[in-house]
Image (tube, rainbow, N blue to C red):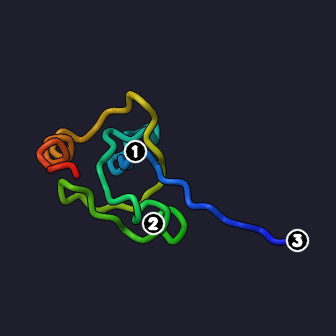
Amino acid sequence: MSTTTKTIERPDIREDVSNTDDDTPKFFHYVKKNQIVDSAVSGKMVVALCGETFPVTKQAKPGSPVCPDCERIYKGLRRK
């Protein structure tokens, strides 16, 4: 009996940094996909496009507020 493992790519690269009093992030930030899982598992800090650093603790839901600086930088990046 053999087991295989597949890597599932996340379509969204936004993650959390700033929390409000009720533990809901104020904004979600854009970070590199490969850093998300590593940070969530190990607690390592990630660096968002805007320069903010934080450990990944929550995943963005559709419609979550996005950091305006990250969004501006992301939209300015060329897509392949």
* Tag nearer the camera, 2 or 1: 1
Instruction: Identify residue type, mark 2.
Output: Ser
Residue furthest top as drawn = 63
Side of 37 relative to 6 (left or right): left
Instruction: Identify residue type, mark 3.
Output: Met
Q: Residue at x 48, y 48 (%)?
A: 58
Q: Position of residue 30 (x, y in %)?
A: 29, 50
Pick the front one: 33 or 78: 78
Sequence-wise, which precedes: disc 2 or disc 3? 3
Side of 18 relative to 43 (left or right): left
Q: Position of residue 70 (x, y in %)?
A: 20, 46
Side of 8 relative to 23 (left or right): right
Query: How far apart are labels 2 and 3 at the CA level?
Result: 32 Å
The part of the image, by quadrant, that contains residue 76 is top left
Q: Secondary structure at mark 2?
A: helix
Sequence-wise, which precedes: disc 2 or disc 1? 1
Query: How far apart are labels 1 and 3 at the CA level?
Result: 34 Å
Sequence-wise, which precedes: disc 1 or disc 3? 3
Q: Position of residue 25 (x, y in %)?
A: 38, 41
Q: Residue at x 56, y 60 (%)?
A: 7
Residue 63 circle label = none
Residue 12 circle label = 1
Q: Residue at x 51, y 72 (%)?
A: 42
Q: Decide: marks 2, 1 in contact (CB < 8 A)?
A: no
Q: Residues within 10 Å of mark 3 (few under 14, many from 20)?
A: few
The part of the image, by quadrant, that contains residue 47 is bottom left
Q: Residues within 10 Å of mark 1 (few under 14, many from 20)?
A: some
Residue 1 circle label = 3
Q: Secondary structure at mark 1?
A: loop
State the quadrant of the N terminus: bottom right
**Which residue matches tag 2?**
39
